[in-house]
Image: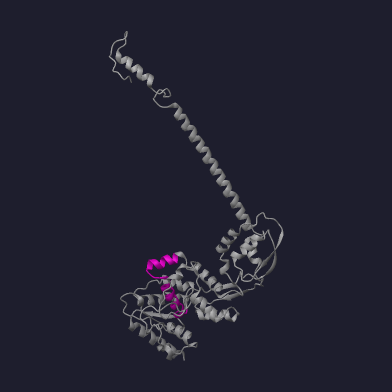
Amino acid sequence: MSLFKRKKRNVGEYTGDDYENALRELDSDPDDDFFGTNTFTESASTVTALIKGIVYIAFVIVAACTLAYFGISFFNDIFAFVKEDREVEVVIPEYVTSDELADILGDAGVIKHPGVFRFYAKLKKIDKKEQTYKFKAGTYTVNANTNYDGLFLSFVEKKIITTVRITVPEGYTVDGIIDLFLAQGIGTREGWVDAVQNYDFGEEYPYLADIPENEGRIYRLEGYLFPDTYDFYTGMPEYYYLRRMLDRFDEIFSSELRDACEELGKSIDEVLTVASIIEKEAFYANDYELVSQVIWNRLADGSPIAYLECESTVIYAMSHDLGRKVTEADFSYVSPYNSSLQRGMIPGPICNPSYNAIITSIYPGESTKPLYYFVTDLDKNVRAASTKKEHDQNIEDIKKEAAQAH
């Protein structure tokens, strides 16, 4: 703008305002387009964005190729898809760990990625499986074209593996199961008891963490070792056999049954405890429902009878504690398992029940009136009753039948 104020006057047919407007037009940015935008700047921005896009795509391609390369390399090292076929001599010292083994094999050129080997060993819990992967010191010749699993087994003592078939009968106790395995020369009693009571199965069977630490409970895993016929490897640690039986229990006690327990407001341990008593008290499966109803009715809130009064519970405790058969004179034995002295639920299962007993514990059925008593007759059939008077009559009838039989 001019420093001096111009006097507006007409120039020909143009006014002073027309003159000022013409000057402003001359001062405008020559690069501005029709709409007042800078055409040069916009073009530069487009080129910059295009370059950035190309660089980003190139980066992604390079990163993907790098990951693919290392991924293929790692997997090839683990599974030996395409590795050099050559023999290598390695020396394994005593008490070597999987971490140390990784360095030895890496230095010898048997494996390419010792870090991956360590990670794989941790996933497989190699160092924790002492019975299977106890590395033996010595000089070995191994092929570089061997996968990681093969390498782990290359340095352990070779054993002749045999199998044995063992049937765990329905209603067997932990003590009875231990005796079965000891008769086959498998494990020691101390080893079995320690594994049953203390072995950490980790997160394999989460319901084991819910087993209550009831005072006087004899065995932690009582009730959870499912009775069935198994083919086992011999020469394995005790926890291996327990894991097999727990695996079978895990299959049988399905998520549907666990949901049913939750709907009933009962824990798995409570259901198994009642199932174990059913297993021991009823001889025939068609009597399971009657026994189940009596037990649950006595355990219910507001029940007129506070004790289960089942002889099988005290027999379980005495057989374990005294190691002999129980006589009628022993039924006053003081124990948390004596359901004639202990109110309500006993500390835990008294055997490992069958599937039918478990199902009947969860689904006891219904009777026309609540049952609170049962007794077994000469033919081992259960006779249930709703009142003490009915129960006494059932006992009297059985006595008469016994007299007539003689």
Q: Quadrant of the N terminus?
A: top left
Q: Residue furthest front?
A: 3
Q: Is residue 294 above or below residue 4?
A: below
Q: Nearer the viewer, residue 380 or 260?
A: 260
Residue 148 found in image quarter: bottom right
What residue is at 68 percent from the left and 67 percent from the top? Answer: 91
Q: Residue furthest top?
A: 12
Q: Which residues are magenta?
A: 256-283
Q: Nearer the viewer, residue 78 or 162?
A: 78
**Residue 133 x, y percent position in the rendering:** 61, 69
**Residue 261 x, y percent position in the rendering:** 41, 68
Query: Is residue 289 rendered magenta in the image?
Result: no
Residue 108 found in image quarter: bottom right
Q: Is residue 376 visible?
A: no
Predominant SS of the magenta segment: helix
**Residue 254 x, y percent position in the rendering:** 47, 66
Going by the image, does 265 lie left or right of 243?
left
Model colouring? one colour
Going by the image, does 354 lie left or right of 35?
right
What residue is at 54 percent from the left and 44 percent from the top? Answer: 60
Q: Nearer the viewer, residue 346 or 379?
A: 346
Q: Is residue 191 visible?
A: yes
Query: Is residue 275 rendered magenta in the image?
Result: yes
**Residue 370 x, y percent position in the rendering:** 34, 75
